[in-house]
Structure formats: structure tokens, C-alpha cells
Image (cartoon, rainbow, N blue to C red):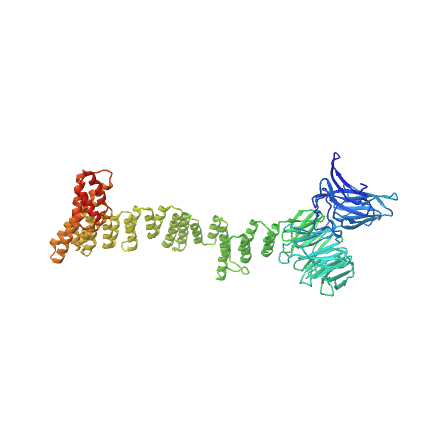
């Protein structure tokens, strides 16, 4: 408006935002645009006071400080109250009266302003002045852009109407896996071609040239050169920080940066300055430098390759005063690239003819026409890629490895990745080089084939390379291949081959291998690949039948292995009349392996049978015992020779565990081990057989009769037990044993059993005392007789009272329990016996109260109180 206000309205005319500029200066023009970079809408306003202001859709002015923006579009922090926006921030002073303006560019990122100064002035979307497109003879009053093409139409005060076309020149730089290019004239974008990460550097000035080298980045602005660097120890770091500001103003065709220098080319002159802006070297060539490639080198002494318009190619070291002529062609050089080993150079002339020169022999190795660009592989020295029309070619000096259609031109080749430039964007293309690997494989050049495989081939291709290396005994290459594949079986095989080489059983690759050695390696490789039928044929062809038997044995194909053994032995006998191959030892070994496999597959019955046939009785016995096979153990006990005490002893022990004591005793009888035979019979309580056996072996009388007497005592045959103890010479053992039984019965509250044991014990003590001649012993056993008889009476009576107190019913009338209690108290007297409770008199008190036996009540209380 004429009063300096800006109002934004809806389609129906209602006001959305109103911006009060506050100075009352008339607004001359206003233009909208949508910024893809910032994902926002902005509009520019210019007024008659020669000022430019930029606003967002919300009415907030874009913050500007001293004519520049922050790293991103920033908004003022002051909020907008109601529908009226508040003007704040700083305007850009133009220096002329603007009459019109227009957003131009592919994404409308530039602002063209025309007016009093008779020029089309170009500004960035941040308000930074870039320059001017054209200059007229009068005021430019109007300016419009073409909706689809890069064209402008202007109208001047003197009536001139003119159409003009504009373009933005590409400024970029490439080094290995990093690519830097200019964006919207004032920004630089660095792209990591492997990780696809990008970093943007805002310069807020016209970017004239860019140079990138390792972690260094140089940006030439209108009056200075900025040096940035990233982390040198991280190849993927994309955080660039400013290192130096070199205050130099110059125009050049080519800009390069090194670790400590800036190099720029001006026609025939090449100048080298340090980061402080001081010139250290300069060189003057015979003709203009057309292209320059940086080759790297020690810090401060990097080398350059320079192609000139007169066809000469020079090498230039930064600390050397004289360039070195590498080669020369007949026409102007338009492109050069040096191989990774610096022994070959690719040159493209102005006629698009590619020639590859050897720097050692000075001969031309390759010549191709209609080539637009080329690049040597950074990993493999002999691998070159180039583009012709829309086709990518990957070649060596003598073979074309790969072709495929692409868009753009090739700018780099690293491993299996080809970097192609289209417009100002670089994209990475992965190429397959298996064809080249097979070419070298067929030619027997395994080292070159391995280098090709390293660039990226399938797992199948890797395996074919590894097998070829093994057949040719190139073990180092084979090891590298199978380490890459992670195949530990092949690595183990390679280790075995190396060991055989050291012992001289296998010839090294530089010597002539015999046909048998090659056949053996082929057969072993067939085994690793799972082609066992072919492996068996190859082993037979090499006359190593034992390896066939071993192969079938490892495959658990024992029937076929046995057939091979029989067949081989028959052939040998027909030729020589004798054969040691099919020997009993070999057969036993085969049967043993068969048995082990059967056991591993849980076929234990077959395993036991195979172990018996192989003569491994110990394993067969263990299997039979583990599964409780009595029949197998019996068969083994009969088959084993009686002199084999170890296996017969094992059979006997396992038969005894399985309850077959008679068979176990028979085993011990075969080896004459009477003591072990008696142990088995006693454990099984086979007393008739034990007593019969001890009659012929009286030295074992005590060994048999002692457990026999204990067994009789446990089965209530005390008289027989006493006789057995006497036979064993242990007459006192019966008394001790009955005492133990009685004590256990008392502890378990089986007082009736305790009474019976003590009664038996009293009789036994009386018998011992009667038969003893020693008076001291007789008196001792008579004392024990009385004590046991008393205990028998007490426990017998106490059992009825105990049961009365514990059971829910009574088996006798109360008077009977009353009399039992009287007898118990009378019999006990002052003695204390184990298991007799002290609290039962109080219980008897309740019973006696019911019977109204007052006198006995007093007696009970008297006993308790005492």
C-alpha cells in the first residue's frame, strides 16, 4: 500500500495478516515464492526508500543481521498479536529505487530486482547480493520470467523490450569418494559417495571455485578463499570446520587444494600459495593448461598431472621448480587420469579419442574413439572404465570386462563402484566384474583373478576361484578366498596341504606336480563339494582304494566300504597272489567304526553286535548293561575266554546288578574267584549255595555265617541264628543284635515289639550265662537277664496304657487300665526307662477320678509332687 502496510487476505476478501511497517513509505512491489530448501513460503517487499524486506506467510520478518542471515532461515522471536504483524528485523539496503522484482531459478531460489540502476540485480533467497545479469541504457520498469524455460523478458523506460536467457554454470570438485558442488550460487554441498551423507556450507557470497582433496575443502569467494577440513582419522566424517581464511582475490580456470597449499591456474601460469596467502612457487608453461589432476603425495610435496593445449602432459611436484614431461599427443588435451601405480596414463584429446600410454615403455596400450571421460580403478591398477555416448565400458589393456548403459559421464572408479556425473549430481553404480575374473581364471592368472574377485563377485564365483587356486596349489590365494567366505572346513584342508608341502608329500606351485597328486587333490575337493561319487572314482583312478574305503566309512556307508575292501583284495590276489589290504585288523577297524555309528544313531542293539564281532567286548558289555540286555551279557560271558578276567568280571557285576546272581556267580566260577562268587550269593541271600560252597572252602566260614546269622535273626529264627553265630565263632553277636532291635522298637514307640525283643534277649542272656564257665561273665549275663526281663514286663504293660492314650477307643475296661497303672507304678519304682512318659500319671488322675478311687488319687499326687 502507499502507506507502507502489507495486508494478506483470504479468497473471500477477509484479512488474514496485516503487517504495519510504521514508516509510511510506499511499497513498490511484492513477490511470493515457495522455498523447497526450507519448506516454507516467503515473499519479498521493496519500497521507494530503496529497501528489501523478506517475510514469512505468518507475517514474521526474516531476521537479518548486517545484511546476512544465520545458518538457516531464522524468524524474529517477537510474536504477532492478533491479525496485525509487527515489522522487526533489519531490511536490506539496495542502493537504487526498485521498480519490479521476480523470483527465478529452478526452484525460485533467486530474486531478480530491476529499477533505477538500469541493471537486473540478482539476490539470494537470504537477501545476499550475488551480482547482475545485464545492464541497459535506461530504467528497467518491468521484468517477467518464462514459466518453463530459463528466460527473462524486461521492459525499459526508453521503450525497449528484450528477451534474454540465463543459466547457472556448474562449479564442482571430485576426489575419490567425496564430491563437492555449488548450490544456489552461495552454498556448497559436500556429498560422501559411499555413505550418501551430505553436508551444506552457507557462504553468503558468490562461490566461484571449489577444490576438494582428502579431508580438505577450499572455497573461493569474491574476495577470499576459505579452507575447511574434517577429521583426518575418520574417512566417513562429514563435519567440516573452517581452518583458514586466505585473503586473496584472483580469477582462475582451475583451483586445487593440497595439505598445505592452494594451487590455481591462470592460462599458462600455475601459482602455488600457502594458507597464509604467501606465494611459494609458480610455473609458466609453453601453452595453456587445459586440465589438471591432483595425484596426492607427501604433505607439502604433492604432485599434479597437467594436460596442455599443445598436447603435452606434465608431472609437477610442488617443491620442484621444473615440470616433468610424461607424454605428448598431437592435439589438445581435454582430459587426463593417472593409474593408481602411476605407471599408466589415460588421455582424451579434443577429438574425443582415448589413448592409454605406458609411462615405463612409452608405448600406446589402448586407443578408443568417441570417448567422453575415463577413470582408472583406485584398487586395481590395470582396470579402466570410460564412457562413450550412453555406454559404460570397463576394460583392461587386453580384455573388455563389462558394458552397460548409463546416463552421464564417469568421474571416478573405486573398487566395484563407478561414479557417474549427470548435470551436477553424482550417483554411484555397482558393476559386476565376474566376467573379468573368469577371463583371468581361464588364462591361469590367479592373482589377477583374485584382484577382480575382491571388487565384488558372488559366493559361487569366489568358490570357483578358491577351487582353482587349490588345484594349482596357490595356497595363499586359496586361503584368502576361503577366509573371505568364512569356510573353516576348506581352511582346515588348506592347513593340511601346507603341512604336506612342508613334509614334501605335495609339490609347491612353482614345481611340476605329478598326475597322482593332482588326482588326489581333485578327489579331496570333490569330497568338500559333496560329490562323493566323483571323489570315489578319482581316488580309484589315483590307485588309492584305501581312501575310498575311508570315504565310505566316514559317510557311514559301511556295506559299500566292505564291498570295496573285498573287491580290492580280490584284484590284488589275482595279480600278486597275496593281499594285506583285506586283513583281519582292517576288518575289525571297519566293524568298530560301524558300531560307533550305530551307537551314535541310537541303534544300540546293532552297535552291541558290531562291537562283539569287532572283538571290543568292553563296549559291548557297557551297552548291554546300560539297556539291561541279559541275553547279550550271557552270550558275552560264554564267548569270552576264561583267561579274560577283566571282561568276565564286568559281565558278572552287571548280571548281579540286573538280578541274575546265579549267572554272575557262574562267571566268577569260570575264573575261580570264590570270594567274589560268595559275595554275589550272600547279596542274593542264596544261603544253600553259599553254605555248600563254604564247605569246600573253610577259610570263608566267618564270611558266610555272620551275614547268615544276621539274616536268621531278622527272620525270627533266633535259635538258628545263635547256632550260626556260634558256627561263625561270634556267640555274643545275637545278644548285641537283639539289643539293637529292642532299642529301635522303643525309639519308634513299638512297645509291644520292644517287650518281645527284651523277653527274647532275657532268654538269650540266660542261655549264655548257663553255658559260660567264667564266673564274672556268668554274673554279668545274669544281671542283664534280670534287667531285660523287667524291661519286657514294663514295656508290655506300658504298651496298653500308651495305646489307650493315643487311640480313640479302648480295648479293655477302665478297671483293667487302673490295675495296669498300679502294676506299672509298682514295677517302675524309681527307675527311668527310655520311651516311658512322665506326664501319664496326670492323665491317670482324670481316669481315677471317674472311678472315684480316692486313695489311689492321693498316691498319684504324691508321686507327682515327689
Front in this rendered view, residue 158 or 340: 158
Would residue 574 appear left or right of 157 to someone viewing this image? left
The quarter holding residue 322 reads bottom right
Q: Where is residue 471 in the image (x, y as percent from the top left)?
A: 53, 55
Q: Position of residue 296 (x, y in %)?
A: 68, 60
Q: Residue furthest top?
A: 12
Answer yes or no: is residue 720 visible: no
Would residue 4 appear left or right of 391 to someone viewing this image? right
Front in this rendered view, residue 102 or 848: 848
Would residue 313 appear left or right of 758 to someone viewing this image? right
Residue drawn at (23%, 41%) of the image: 805
Answer yes or no: is residue 589 visible: yes
Q: Where is residue 442 in the image (x, y as percent from the top left)?
A: 59, 53
Q: Position of residue 233 (x, y in %)?
A: 62, 58
Front in this rendered view, residue 495 or 49: 49
Count the labels in the image.
0
Query: Looking at the rendering, in which quadrant would you find the N terminus?
Result: top right
Amino acid at each position: 500500500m502507499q502507506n507502507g502496510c502489507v495486508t494478506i487476505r483470504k479468497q473471500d476478501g477477509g484479512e488474514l495478516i496485516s503487517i504495519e511497517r510504521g514508516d509510511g513509505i510506499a511499497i513498490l512491489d511484492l513477490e511470493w515464492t515457495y522455498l523447497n530448501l526450507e519448506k516454507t513460503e516467503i515473499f519479498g517487499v521493496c519500497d521507494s526508500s530503496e529497501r528489501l524486506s523478506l517475510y514469512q506467510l505468518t507475517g514474521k520478518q526474516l531476521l537479518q543481521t548486517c545484511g546476512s542471515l544465520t545458518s538457516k532461515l531464522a524468524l524474529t522471536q517477537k510474536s504477532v498479536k492478533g491479525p496485525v504483524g509487527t515489522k522487526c528485523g533489519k531490511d536490506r539496503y539496495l542502493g537504487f529505487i526498485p521498480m519490479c522484482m521476480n523470483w527465478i531459478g529452478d526452484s525460485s531460489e533467486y530474486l531478480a530486482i530491476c529499477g533505477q540502476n538500469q541493471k537486473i540485480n540478482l539476490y539470494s533467497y537470504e537477501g545476499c547480493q550475488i551480482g547482475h545479469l545485464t545492464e541497459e541504457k535506461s530504467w528497467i520498469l518491468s521484468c517477467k520470467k518464462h514459466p518453463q524455460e530459463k528466460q527473462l523478458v524486461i521492459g525499459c523506460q526508453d521503450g525497449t523490450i528484450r528477451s534474454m536467457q540465463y543459466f547457472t554454470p556448474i562449479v564442482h570438485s571430485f576426489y575419490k569418494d567425496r564430491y563437492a558442488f555449488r548450490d544456489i550460487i552461495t552454498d556448497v554441498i559436500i556429498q560422501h559417495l559411499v555413505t550418501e551423507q551430505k553436508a551444506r556450507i552457507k557462504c553468503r557470497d558468490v562461490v566461484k571455485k571449489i577444490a576438494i582433496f582428502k579431508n580438505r575443502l577450499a572455497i573461493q569467494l569474491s574476495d577470499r578463499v576459505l579452507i575447511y577440513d574434517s577429521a583426518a582419522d575418520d574417512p566417513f566424517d562429514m563435519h567440516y570446520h573452517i581452518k583458514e581464511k586466505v585473503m586473496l582475490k584472483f580469477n582462475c580456470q582451475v583451483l586445487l587444494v593440497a595439505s598445505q597449499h592452494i594451487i590455481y591456474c591462470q592460462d599458462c601460469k600455475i601459482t602455488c600459495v600457502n594458507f597464509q596467502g604467501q606465494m611459494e612457487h609458480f610455473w609458466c608453461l609453453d601453452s595453456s593448461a587445459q586440465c589438471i589432476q591432483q595425484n596426492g603425495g607427501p604433505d607439502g610435496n604433492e604432485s599434479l598431472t597437467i594436460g596442455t593445449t599443445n598436447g603435452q602432459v606434465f608431472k609437477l611436484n610442488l617443491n620442484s621448480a621444473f615440470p616433468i614431461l610424461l607424454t605428448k599427443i598431437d592435439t589438445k588435451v581435454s582430459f587426463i587420469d593417472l593409474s593408481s601405480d602411476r605407471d599408466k596414463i589415460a588421455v582424451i584429446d579434443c577429438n574425443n579419442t582415448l589413448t592409454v600410454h605406458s609411462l615405463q615403455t612409452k608405448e600406446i596400450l589402448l586407443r578408443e574413439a568417441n570417448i567422453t571421460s575415463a577413470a582408472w580403478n583406485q584398487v586395481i591398477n590395470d582396470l579402466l572404465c570410460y564412457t562413450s555416448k550412453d555406454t559404460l565400458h570397463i576394460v583392461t589393456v587386453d580384455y573388455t570386462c563389462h558394458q552397460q548403459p548409463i546416463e552421464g559421464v564417469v568421474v571416478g572408479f573405486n573398487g566395484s563402484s563407478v561414479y557417474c556425473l549427470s548435470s551436477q549430481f553424482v550417483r554411484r553404480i555397482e558393476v559386476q566384474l565376474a566376467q573379468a575374473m573368469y577371463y583371468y581364471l581361464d588364462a591361469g592368472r590367479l592373482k589377477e583373478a583374485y584382484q577382480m574377485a575382491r571388487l565384488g563377485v558372488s559366493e559361487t564365483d569366489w568358490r570357483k576361484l578358491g577351487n582353482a587356486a587349490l588345484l594349482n596349489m596357490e595356497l595363499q590365494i586359496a586361503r584368502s578366498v576361503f577366509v573371505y567366505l568364512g569356510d573353516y572346513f576348506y581352511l582346515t584342508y588348506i592347513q593340511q596341504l601346507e603341512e604336506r608341502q612342508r613334509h614334501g608329500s605335495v609339490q609347491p606351485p612353482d614345481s611340476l606336480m605329478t598326475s597322482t597328486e593332482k588326482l588326489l587333490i581333485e578327489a579331496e575337493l570333490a569330497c568338500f563339494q559333496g560329490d562323493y561319487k566323483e571323489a570315489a572314482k578319482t581316488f580309484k583312478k589315483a590307485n588309492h582304494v584305501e581312501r575310498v574305503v575311508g570315504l565310505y566309512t566316514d559317510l557311514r556307508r559301511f556295506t559299500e566300504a566292505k564291498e570295496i575292501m573285498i573287491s580290492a583284495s580280490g584284484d590284488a590276489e589275482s595279480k600278486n597272489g597275496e593281499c594285506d589290504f583285506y586283513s583281519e585288523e582292517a576288518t575289525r577297524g571297519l566293524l568298530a567304526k560301524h558300531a560307533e555309528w550305530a551307537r551314535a544313531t541310537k541303534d544300540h542293539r546293532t552297535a552291541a553286535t558290531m562291537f562283539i564281532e569287532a572283538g571290543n567286548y568292553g563296549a559291548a558289555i557297557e551297552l548291554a548293561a546300560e539297556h539291561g540286555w541279559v541275553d547279550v551279557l550271557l552270550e558275552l560271558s560264554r564267548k569270552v575266554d576264561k583267561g579274560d578276567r577283566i571282561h568276565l568280571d564286568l559281565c558278572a557285576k552287571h548280571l548281579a546288578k540286573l538280578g541274575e546272581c546265579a549267572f554272575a556267580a557262574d562267571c566268577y566260577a569260570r575264573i575261580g574267584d570264590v570270594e567274589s562268587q560268595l559275595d554275589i550269593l550272600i547279596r542274593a541271600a542264596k544261603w544253600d549255595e553259599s553254605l555248600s560252597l563254604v564247605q569246600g572252602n573253610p577259610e570263608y566260614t566267618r564270611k558266610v555265617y555272620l551275614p547268615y546269622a544276621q539274616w536268621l535273626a531278622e527272620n525270627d529264627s533266633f535259635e538258628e541264628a545263635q547256632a550260626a553265630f556260634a558256627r561263625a565263632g561270634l556267640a555274643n553277636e545275637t545278644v548285641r543284635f537283639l539289643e539293637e532291635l529292642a532299642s529301635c522298637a522303643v525309639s519308634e514307640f513299638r512297645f509291644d515289639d520292644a517287650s518281645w525283643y527284651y523277653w527274647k534277649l532275657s532268654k538269650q542272656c540266660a542261655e549264655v550265662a548257663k553255658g559260660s564257665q567264667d564266673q564274672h561273665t556268668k554274673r554279668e549275663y545274669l544281671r542283664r537277664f534280670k534287667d531285660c526281663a523287667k524291661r519286657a514286663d514294663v514295656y508290655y504293660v506300658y504298651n496298653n496304657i500308651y495305646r489307650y492314650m493315643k487311640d480313640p477307643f479302648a480295648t479293655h475296661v477302665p478297671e483293667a487300665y487302673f490295675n495296669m497303672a498300679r502294676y506299672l507304678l509298682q514295677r517302675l519304682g524309681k527307675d527311668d526307662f527310655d520311651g516311658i512318659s512322665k506326664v501319664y500319671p496326670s492323665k491317670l488322675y482324670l481316669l481315677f477320678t471317674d472311678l472315684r478311687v480316692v486313695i489311689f488319687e492321693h498316691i498319684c499326687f504324691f508321686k507327682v509332687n515327689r
